Image (tube, helix red, strand yellow):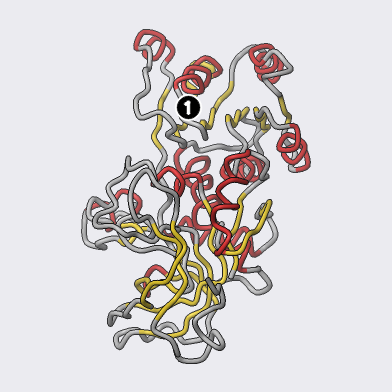
Amino acid sequence: MNGSPAVLSSTSPVECTLMNAVEILEYGRPFHYGQRSVPDVKADEALIAVNASGLCRTDIRLLEGGTNLGQLPRIPGHEIAGEIVKVGAQVSQWQTGQRVAVATDVTCRTCVYCRAGQSQRCQNKKRIGFELDGGHADFVTAPADNLIPLPDGLSYEKACVVPDAVATMYHSLIGRGKVGIHQKVIILGLGGLGIHGVQIARLAGAEVLVTSRSRARLDAARRYGALTVNPMEEDLAAAVADFSGGLGADVVADCVGSHETIGQGLAFLRPGGKLLVIGYHDADIVVPSVPLFSTEKEVIGCRGSSRQEVIDAFDLVGRGRIDVVVGATCPLSAIGEAVARMNSGSVIGRLVLTR
């Protein structure tokens, strides 16, 4: 199938009614690459010609059916950057031709959480790339309120990663973990989230230790100022004790979310320390109650980010304080190859689908 875009240029009116898209047709089956109708634009929305979309591990997990996506088929993709090609009748703050990224959560803006600036907790939200069609396509629609302008000079490939892989770690470490100067922070898991978490924690003034079984990922983390340990080659408990002076870490950020890493995270904390649960590999986790209350350790769930935190993340990226790590790119039409590369564990940072 021809993977060419459905418009002659990103600033011209849409000239075709069909677009290329990656779809989930049925749970338990691979992604399908085919054609879909270009979506209609509602009065409060914009139509975005997608230039790049990040392929997240969550996208692949959607195939398992653990998340209710509503009526299939569904276009996944919640890391999106592109150019506005059309705006709805009620949209006045955006114009065609503007470069934007898209915040994932479409929120009600009226509930107690939205009014408190905690949009990630909105109980009425729908998510682009989950309950709503996402950005693994030539075009996507999004409410105008979900659009974020791109800093000058930031590529689409890097920009699409910011609303999730960067902003989520900003929310987790700064918003939820309150990471600060001279704290000891351990990051378990060094994928697209973890590598940006290293930079955010270091920027906040913390000392960082990261774990991974990949030498290439550990090399990358060292370039951003982290100490590293490969648990396949080194004694992880001894490395943590040496890193923390035997006291334990102030914060452990678990980007995996397995039974093993939850247990490790609690064991590696000092009394009063915080375990940030960011990943969710296993559906259920077990937390021993006696060690938890006797040492006053905290287990803190971390989900996504508020809209303001996405804006803050873009500000840091635009000022060169955070380097967005794109480890590989694949054309949208090569979605099968992209998934295989993700599953191989060879990608450092985020894999991005290009147009």
- Picture residue at 59% right of the left edge, 37% below the top: 180
Observer-nearest residue: 73 or 290? 73
Query: Residue 119, relative to residue 38: is it above or below?
Result: above
Q: Residues within 10 Å of mark 1 (few under 14, many from 20)?
A: many
How many numbered discs, if any? 1
> In x, y percent, where is residue 319?
67, 63
Observer-nearest residue: 192 or 22? 22
> Which residue lies most toward the front here?
1
- Picture residue at 61% right of the left edge, 71% below the top: 151
> In x, y percent, where is residue 124?
22, 55
* 34 displayed left or right of 328: left
Instruction: Kindly tell me whether residue 275 is visible in this rendering.
Output: yes
Observer-nearest residue: 195 or 216? 216
- Picture residue at 54% right of the left edge, 50% below the top: 165
Query: Residue 97, relative to residue 68: is it above or below?
Result: below
> In x, y percent, where is residue 71?
24, 57
Instruction: Examine the image and state in which quarter residue 308 appears.
Output: bottom left
The kind of residue tagged 1 is Lys
Query: Residue 122, relative to residue 299: is it above or below?
Result: below
Instruction: Kindly tell me whether residue 322 is visible in this rendering.
Output: no
- Picture residue at 50% right of the left edge, 64% below the top: 80
The quadrant of the rendering that contains the C terminus is bottom right
* 113 displayed left or right of 254: left
| Residue assigned mark 1 | 274
Helix, strand or loop at label 1? It is strand
> In x, y percent, where is residue 155?
65, 68
Instruction: Examine the image and state in which quarter residue 64 appears.
Output: top left
Instruction: Examine the image and state in which quarter residue 281 appears.
Output: top left
